Image: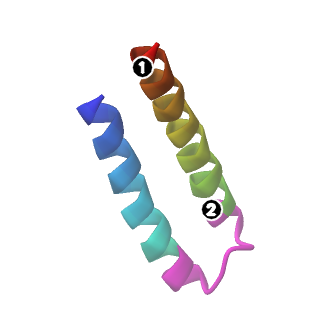
Amino acid sequence: MDSLENKINDLRKKLTEIVQIKGGFADEDVVQISQELDRLILEMQKKKKRSRN
């Protein structure tokens, strides 16, 4: 799971940087990165839930 956490943290940093560059959240690149980040976060939540059961 550490690898997944690293991917999430890297993508969060990238999202923050690109939002500053693009000037907001409406840019297509920002939306794509945000959606990928959402997908990875959901994946991590599912893995954590399975490990608790």
Name the one closer to the observer, 42 or 17.
42
Q: Give the residues in magenta.
A: 19-30
Q: Quadrant of residue 24?
A: bottom right
In the picture as drawn, the residue positioned furthest to the left comes out as 2
Mark number, residue 52: 1
Q: Is residue 24 left or right of residue 4?
A: right
At 60% from the left edge and 56% from the top edge, which residue is drawn? Answer: 34
Depth-wise, is mark 2 or mark 1 nearer the camera?
1
Question: Crowdedness of circle 1 by 10 Å Cα count: few (<14), some, many (20+)?
Answer: few
| Residue type (three-letter) at the residue carrying disc 1 | Arg
Name the one closer to the observer, 44 or 26.
44
Report which residue position mark 2 lands on.
29
| Residue type (three-letter) at the residue carrying disc 2 | Asp
Up/down of 52 relative to 42, above or below? above
In the picture as drawn, the residue positioned furthest to the front comes out as 53
> How many marks on residues?
2
Measuring from the top left, give residue 31's x and y in whole percent.
Answer: 68, 60
At 34% from the left edge and 54% from the top edge, which residue is drawn? Answer: 10
Up/down of 19 relative to 36, above or below? below
